[in-house]
Image (cartoon, coloured by chain):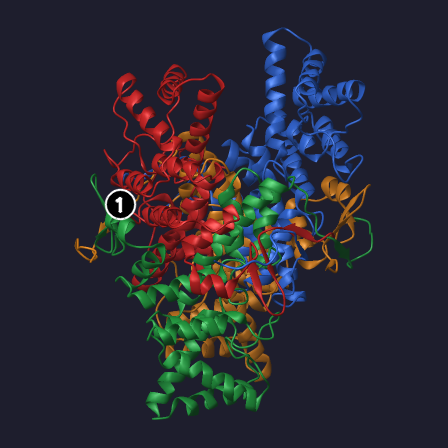
Chain colours: A orange, B blue, C green, D red
Amino acid sequence: MDAWRTSIANSDDTGIWVRGYDIPSLMTQKSFADMVFLLHQGRLPADAERRLIDAILVAVADHGAGAPSCAATRLVASGNRQSLSAAVAAGILAIGDEHGGAGSACIEMISAGLALAKRESLSIAEAACRTVEDAKANRKRLAGLGHRVHSKDPRTDVLFEMAESGGVAGDGIAFMRAVESEAKERIKPLPINIDGALAAVLHDLGFPPPFGKLIFIIGRVAGLTAEAAEEYQREKAMRIRIPVQYDGEPPRRVE
Amino acid sequence: MDAWRTSIANSDDTGIWVRGYDIPSLMTQKSFADMVFLLHQGRLPADAERRLIDAILVAVADHGAGAPSCAATRLVASGNRQSLSAAVAAGILAIGDEHGGAGSACIEMISAGLALAKRESLSIAEAACRTVEDAKANRKRLAGLGHRVHSKDPRTDVLFEMAESGGVAGDGIAFMRAVESEAKERIKPLPINIDGALAAVLHDLGFPPPFGKLIFIIGRVAGLTAEAAEEYQREKAMRIRIPVQYDGEPPRRVE
Amino acid sequence: MDAWRTSIANSDDTGIWVRGYDIPSLMTQKSFADMVFLLHQGRLPADAERRLIDAILVAVADHGAGAPSCAATRLVASGNRQSLSAAVAAGILAIGDEHGGAGSACIEMISAGLALAKRESLSIAEAACRTVEDAKANRKRLAGLGHRVHSKDPRTDVLFEMAESGGVAGDGIAFMRAVESEAKERIKPLPINIDGALAAVLHDLGFPPPFGKLIFIIGRVAGLTAEAAEEYQREKAMRIRIPVQYDGEPPRRVE
Amino acid sequence: MDAWRTSIANSDDTGIWVRGYDIPSLMTQKSFADMVFLLHQGRLPADAERRLIDAILVAVADHGAGAPSCAATRLVASGNRQSLSAAVAAGILAIGDEHGGAGSACIEMISAGLALAKRESLSIAEAACRTVEDAKANRKRLAGLGHRVHSKDPRTDVLFEMAESGGVAGDGIAFMRAVESEAKERIKPLPINIDGALAAVLHDLGFPPPFGKLIFIIGRVAGLTAEAAEEYQREKAMRIRIPVQYDGEPPRRVE
């Protein structure tokens, strides 16, 4: 088998390098948010960039044991006490386009909207209007808007203000704000949720769509490890049995 | 079903709190390493404590695509392009006592050694000597010592120096240094590896044994997401087929 | 929380029922292939139907440790010896549209082709011709045709002959044969592979597209458990390290 | 990298062999239960052996959506609609010593008990008595006895009667019956549950302890695929949110 090629990390008997930087230097001079940026963009971030990565990782780490990711971790921790890895992995598996992963679709929507603006020489507001009308006509949900729990997500403003004060706010944030405004006028009030906020920020920091899901995974894992640890400490194995209502075939005989 | 109880996170229509702190405050004033500490200890860390968490997360994030965790992520990314979560989860599953998880066993060894010292009024050096003699007599490996690639792990000194200059080095580090010294005299030179180093530091920061594995999982996930992203970007699906040598039964007929 | 509703299985203090049949009766009178059919279709199969399910499960169970699913299982078994479940789960995660899951896309293609024939009053051969021309024009791969290892998949004929002699071959098999024939004429010889064969058979047995992937998962798990068991028995933990060629940034200094 | 060695399966351009038998022959002449036996024991089973494998696979496939394995599959299917593999894998991860995997510990208990009988020239009843007294003295649970739902597991008698009428019942079943009888006398009535029943049968069929968990995984996967399919068909994404009661720190300010 040919060796696999990679541009991420490298090690020999004396050292380890990530994107060319040796690990001891990174350990003493940089934070984990720097490392996340470096691993995915190939360069170290400026301060304002790093602060936004930190803020997103903090924002998504956990907001309750009942979310599908946290609950999957707890179910596995309940049935299988041999492997903390298994419990954490199950929580990650619950992350998809529907839970935690909408940021990816939203970065795609932003990129498509801005490409449309450029291609047809539209303003950002005009491109946002077209995006909203298009979703309305096709009865599609607008990625990054609305939330089933929070009428106004408290995390959105924080991210946008940090991006603006740090001088890294760009067309992505402008576009999402325009989409929110157009949606309010043409559909109903749909505030930008955390997925939409992080998507706008990540777009402006130069990340591609998949990173909208990947950064959620990285941040959420810290919540999942805490959920697994609490389940092991506070609860007996097999304490969880979900109540079920059977509505299928009545008893019948094998012929 | 009774509601599940938890002391980690809480949310309502207007806010999200982790361990009682509201998320917007954490986002603007704290880093992800603070959040990891908070989630698992229930309090925010001091600066020196946070820097060590950062250093450990940076240290373990990645050191090459060929390790079992990274390779499992790439294999799943090769066969299943529908779910980045699946690729990352597979990498986590490869983390166990043998790969990335030895920190847990090492915190247990440190705790047992220090408990022995206390119980029998031994010095740390005497307890370390007993630990080494015991491992030698029972032909058991000493957790946290030796490495199959690095003759001297470059990350160990960095962590210990940071702990000492930050004033958080305690009996855990002292014990591991004594074990290394006793092992050299009684068995052979076995330098403290990254698992042993992070175990000593985590012990001195007050973390229980499972966290030795959990912090490796948190840090490594950032490497796994980067490995998955690179596999998607640079490689075709199904490019990987591991070479296999069959040495089983020769062809035979079903009777 | 409302109880979850389900029509699959039910149990109380005295018994367990699947789709209304009590488990002891199923255990004594039926086989696992019957159970797979019952769980997914809600009725017990006729003999010819059960034999085809058995044949598909046997066909996909394993064909070498180097495939992504089997290799992912072995990597996890190499790094994590605490959980056989983790090793098997990693192998399942490698199953996707690209590896083992093409049967789902192929059932969709068959359904679409037969719907086209009905809608436009075409013969099966005409609908197959349109399907092939369409794929050619759009440079799309035809699901279920061609194989990277086998020039002619030995399992295809077996399935089709069993379906025909059992009297359950229908339009799905006819359509796939017509597609193979049209592809040979209009593109190049592309024999029906195992995914295409099982898709045609499953279509004719009344299964929906997702089952094309699900039956592969069920069958393959028996291979994955055997691979995990062999890795535990014959190999040391951590024996696997994939060779890697680093082609990224050269060493540089953190500024 | 050296090629991985394996004695399980083999393929080339023209064929696929498992344990030396070509797949087309197995497909036409053998069932999936035969394949499971072959993959794990290296030989094809006799009829009575195959029937017991079938009965165990049927027995464990599913008994309700609320068990940790099924519930984990449904949670992942609720949050992540991109990958059926992810949903099934999460269900497998919930299988451990506590859920579905007790058969492994029970085969170990049987092997230890019978080894004790041989070593000390005891009768099976005497060895069972020692096993029960030992568990009582050390306040350990007896593997394979008792059940939290069924006062008498309806599946146990079925398996034992099949083993006896098929002529494959041996010392494993005799030992488990003796343990049940001793437990009743010395502790309390603890009927043999499905884990104990399948462990006794698998011991008498020559399987090693890990297979007690592996056969549960293989059978349960058919239930998990059905649960995932039902969740996709009947329920909206993200319909599940587990109710949670927060009992941690009250709101406080980041200083």
Q: Residue at x 59, y 24 (%)?
A: B108
Q: Position of residue C178 (x, y in %)?
A: 46, 86
| Lateral position of residue C195 relative to residue A42, left or right | left
Quadrant of residue A183 within the rendered picture: bottom left
Q: Which residue is mark 1?
A: A243
Q: Position of residue D254 (x, y in %)?
A: 51, 37
* Quarter of the picture holding the N terminus of chain A: bottom right
Q: Please, which chain is the residue tagged with disc 1 on? A: A
Say few, some or many: other residues with alpha carbon within 10 Å of mark 1 (under 14 / 14 to 19 / 20 or more). Answer: some
Given the image, on which type of amino acid does mark 1 rest? Pro
* Quarter of the picture holding the C terminus of chain A: bottom left
| Lateral position of residue B32 relative to residue B60, left or right | left
What kind of element bears circle 1?
loop
From this view, report whether residue B179 is shown above or below residue C199: above
Q: Position of residue B211 (x, y in %)?
A: 56, 33
Residue situated in front as seen by the camera: C160 or D242? C160
